[in-house]
């Protein structure tokens, strides 16, 4: 058997052929910061396989399409708010009266959504005006020097909570962000969830933030405090848009159309 001794030129061609381009530093740094901030979650024993999920969706859609009563019940339970998602229309729901905004040294922080349920508070805020060199997801030293930015940690270090917003109630109570991993949206720095039962008479809160997540420390405003007001949503009111609208035919039998990437089928008047 002949020995194969590849030439340096051949090896170089092979290396180029299998070489994988490096990810953009901005993406890598943002992903690393997000992962570092995520609460630790235990892997569930039960895993929902795609085929089971697909079967569940098929059954659910069929039942909903064939039962107007179920549709009406669903419409009363949830509303849809763009940028937020499903909003549960539970009894005693309170929400942000109007967006609250504060600008300091050219940086604007805006509270866009707040929903106070019986057992939790969901909040969403945004920030504009931070220069790219002071944004840890864009700065050149965002990866090499993560601790220069709010919430940044070196590999192997525990997460810090300086970039986690807190809520102060009128009586001085401070609400800390939930770290159990119970709420999916809570993995995002600017969508914190607070697990707490807020007294029914509370109509004002104060947003408290030590530093803006991923902002360069010392180069952007810190120690933010922004009060905001709440209003009670009347019982039965749909927040945002209805989740689903179904018009039931009058003069003909119901038809069911269920479409997915995997299949498309229908039940017509002549089908058994």
Image (cartoon, rainbow, N blue to C red):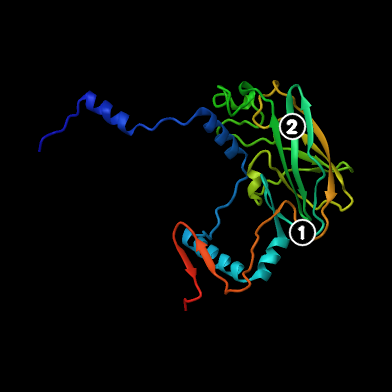
Quadrant of residue 177 within the rendered picture: top right
Which percent across, then down, holds residue 249?
62, 69
Which percent across, then down, holds residue 171?
89, 43
In the orientation shown, which residue stands out farthest toward the left? Answer: 1
Disc 2 is placed on an element classified as strand
Residue visible at 16% across and 33% down? 4
Which percent across, then down, holds residue 94?
81, 51
Compare marks 1 and 2 and give the one earlier in the sequence.
1
Question: Which quadrant does the N terminus fall into?
Answer: top left
Which percent across, then down, holds residue 34?
59, 38
- The CA span between labels 1 and 2 is 29 Å
Residue visible at 72% across and 51% down? 240
- Visible in this render: residue 146? yes
Asked if marks 1 and 2 touch (Cβ < 8 Å), the reply is: no
Could you tell whether 76 is left or right of 254 in the image?
Answer: right
In the orientation shown, which residue stands out farthest toward the bottom? Answer: 272
Observer-nearest of 42 and 254:
254
- Visible in this render: residue 156? no
Could you tell whether 150 is left or right of 15 in the image?
Answer: right
Residue 108 tag number? none
Quadrant of residue 92 within the rendered picture: bottom right
Residue visible at 44% across and 59% down? 262
Q: On the image, numbered disc 2 is attached to which residue?
A: 109
Quadrant of residue 229 within the rendered picture: top right
Residue 90 tag number? 1
Q: Residues within 10 Å of mark 1 (few under 14, many from 20)?
A: some
Observer-nearest of 251 and 154:
251
Q: Residues within 10 Å of mark 2 (few under 14, many from 20)?
A: some
Could you tell whether 246 is left or right of 100 in the image?
Answer: left
């Amino acid at each position: 058997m002949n020995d194969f001794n590849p030439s340096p030129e051949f090896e170089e061609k092979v290396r180029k052929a299998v070489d994988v381009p490096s990810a953009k530093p901005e993406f890598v740094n943002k992903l690393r910061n997000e992962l570092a901030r995520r609460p630790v979650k235990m892997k569930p024993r039960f895993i929902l396989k795609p085929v089971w999920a697909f079967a569940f969706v098929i059954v659910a859609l069929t039942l909903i399409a064939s039962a107007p009563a179920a549709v009406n019940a669903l419409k009363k339970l949830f509303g849809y708010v763009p940028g937020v998602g499903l909003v549960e229309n539970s009894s005693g729901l309170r929400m942000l009266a109007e967006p609250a905004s504060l600008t300091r040294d050219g940086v604007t922080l805006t509270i866009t959504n707040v929903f106070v349920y019986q057992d939790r508070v969901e909040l969403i805020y945004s920030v504009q005006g931070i220069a790219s060199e002071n944004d840890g997801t864009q700065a050149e030293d965002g990866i090499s020097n993560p601790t220069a930015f709010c919430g940044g940690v070196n590999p192997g270090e525990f997460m810090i909570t300086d970039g986690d917003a807190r809520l102060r109630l009128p009586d001085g109570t401070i609400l800390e962000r939930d770290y159990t991993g119970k709420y999916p949206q809570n993995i995002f720095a600017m969508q914190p969830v607070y697990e707490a039962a807020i007294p029914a008479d509370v109509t004002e809160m104060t947003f408290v933030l030590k530093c803006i997540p991923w902002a360069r420390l010392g180069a952007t405003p810190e120690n933010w405090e922004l009060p905001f007001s709440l209003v009670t949503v009347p019982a039965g009111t749909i927040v945002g848009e209805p989740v689903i609208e179904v018009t039931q035919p009058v003069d003909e039998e119901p038809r069911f159309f269920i479409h997915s990437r995997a299949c498309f089928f229908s039940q017509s008047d002549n089908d058994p």
